[in-house]
Image (cartoon, rainbow, N blue to C red):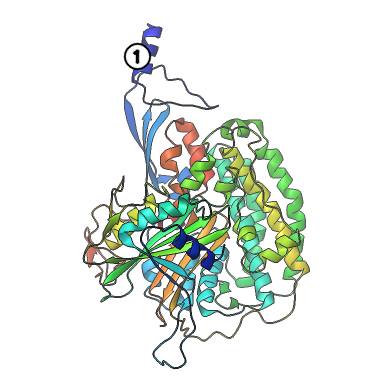
Amino acid sequence: MANETRESAQGSSRIQATGPGEVTVDIRTPDLEINFGPQHPATHGVMRILMRADGELVTGAQPHLGYLHRCAEKIGENVEWLQYLPYTDRYDYLASMNNNLGYSLAVEALLGIEIPRRATLIRIICAELNRIGSHLVAFGTYGLDIGAFTPFLYTFREREWMMALFEKICGARLTYSYIRIGGVFNDAPPGWFEEVARFCDVFDEKWKEYCDLLLVNQIYVKRTANVGVISRDMALDFGLTGPMVRGSGIDWDLRRDMPYMCYGEIWRDGAFKIPVARGEMGALGDCWDRSWVRVMEMVESTKIVRWCLDHMVDGPVIGEIPKTLKVPAGEAYVGIENPRGELGHYVVSDGGKVSIRTRVRGPSFCNLAVLEDVLPGSLVGDAIAIIGSTDIVVGETDR
Amino acid sequence: MDFRGIYDRLVAIHAPGLVKADEPRKADPKDKKDKGRAGDPFVLVEAQELARFLESCRDDDRLHFEQLIDLTATDPAKDAPDFWIGVQLLSLKFRHRLAVKALLPKSAPSLPSTVPVYRASQWHERECAEMFGITFVGHPDPRHVLLPDDWIGYPMRKDYEFPKEYHGISCE
């Protein structure tokens, strides 16, 4: 009887699980459609994935987005250049500094203006601190998704300090609007740089705790290694960027390979490295590799921050920017390395006060598209691990 | 490779649909109406040949554009005759980018899908379709991606009129 069921199941099975995490189907069950979300803690926001499951096996997945859609791009065509800046805070709300930076750089590319050196260094410090904060959330809540509660509290301890630092420099904790077109909003308050240096020193000790607690924890490794493998070709074909592409073993980082601001100088000084996954715990490109890349990136970010602190110069932090900005006619695309990947801004101006197109290429949106292909063939429990490892921010997929 | 190098290579391999290169330039001091153009250079291609053009960009071993980073559309003005289709290509091997642009008449907004070339464009094309009303012929999954399925109109068009209500919810 048992043999019979197995044979008939194999005969009808539509799943061909291959690779290290092989799954054998030996019971025939009807397909079940599951609405994963929209209100589900593991979707990190409001997103729905329509999943089809055959027993414990996922046979199809269709992400449905748009629950947070605000049409930021249309707003960009209705407000002035400077007025759009606060809207950039609100797509990837975990990395608002980076969003401000991406938009400012794109508009500056059209304006063709020079940014004061001090402003550039402060911008990099803020962007890298924000990267640390964003990866702390990604790493901490990823543990939460797959059942480890404690590391989340540890990561939020450091993130709290990072947010306090931002509160000191710009008054906001989440939506900063600090990096402006032409520079930054204001200079750092007295003692701020010293505190940032102290944060880096403390962080250098703390990140080892995350490794002990979670990253090399056997339970964590069992849950993430060999799960959700994204091959090299798939990563390229789907246009993945950031930790997703480095997690698949592709050595690519815009900060080094297409440097903007003074990242090129920092790289030539040998101040930081690009962590690229090597498939240490299982197949290359699995969930573990992606979370390893994020942890190592935080460490590299502290090194970049230190370099900027060591090379800090005096001077103005913002150039002369008129209240009503008129941007020369033309179009520019600027992509920067956001914590989640390449954040691109494509801006088109006709020479007026308002842009005629503000396109946002959100990394989460592009990274999410790969789920349709990665989820089928995995177990329902692993689906949570895979979705968490893509580290999406729904505010950005929906914009 | 810089932009000139890429363009010369595209001419040399007879990339399908290639029209011309458009580079930023300073304003002509003699012509007062001329404002010049700021920003990045791009290549202009024919919209109907876009997919084949991208394929030749991807497969050529000196260009080697492995990734499509972005595909989007622009409605430049209410009375403009064309949409612009903008594509950003990236080569990880040679560390260069290329901006591709195609003009698509508003009277017949339809072009072959680029999904067979880069699967990255799948969601970008869905977004363009729902926001601008552009049809990508041969798209494997032409549903809405961000908007509700029953949304009327194309919000990113310049002549779009904001709805007064949606399912009994006032939008004013």
x, y (%) of residue A253? 61, 55
Q: Is residue B37 above or below residue A212?
A: below
Q: Furthest-front residue in view?
A: B12
Q: Is residue A41 above or below residue A254?
A: above
Q: Is residue A292 above or below residue B90?
A: above
Dot 1 amino acid type: Ser
List the residue tagged with mark 1.
A8
x, y (%) of residue A283? 59, 33
Instruction: Describe residue B41's horizontal placement relative to residue A33 as left or right.
Output: right
Instruction: Describe residue A389's horizontal placement relative to residue B142 as left or right.
Output: right
Instruction: Describe residue A162's horizontal placement relative to residue A106 as left or right.
Output: right
On what subunit does the disc labeled 1 rest?
A
Answer with the quarter of the image where residue A267 lies: bottom right
Answer with the quarter of the image where residue A181 lies: bottom right
**Residue at 53% from the left image edge and 72% from the top image edge:** A104
Element under label 1? helix
Answer with the quarter of the image where residue A263 lies: bottom right
**Residue at 38% from the left image edge and 12% from the top image edge:** A7
* Foreground residue among B31 and A267: B31
Instruction: Describe residue A274's horizontal placement relative to residue A17 as left or right.
Output: right
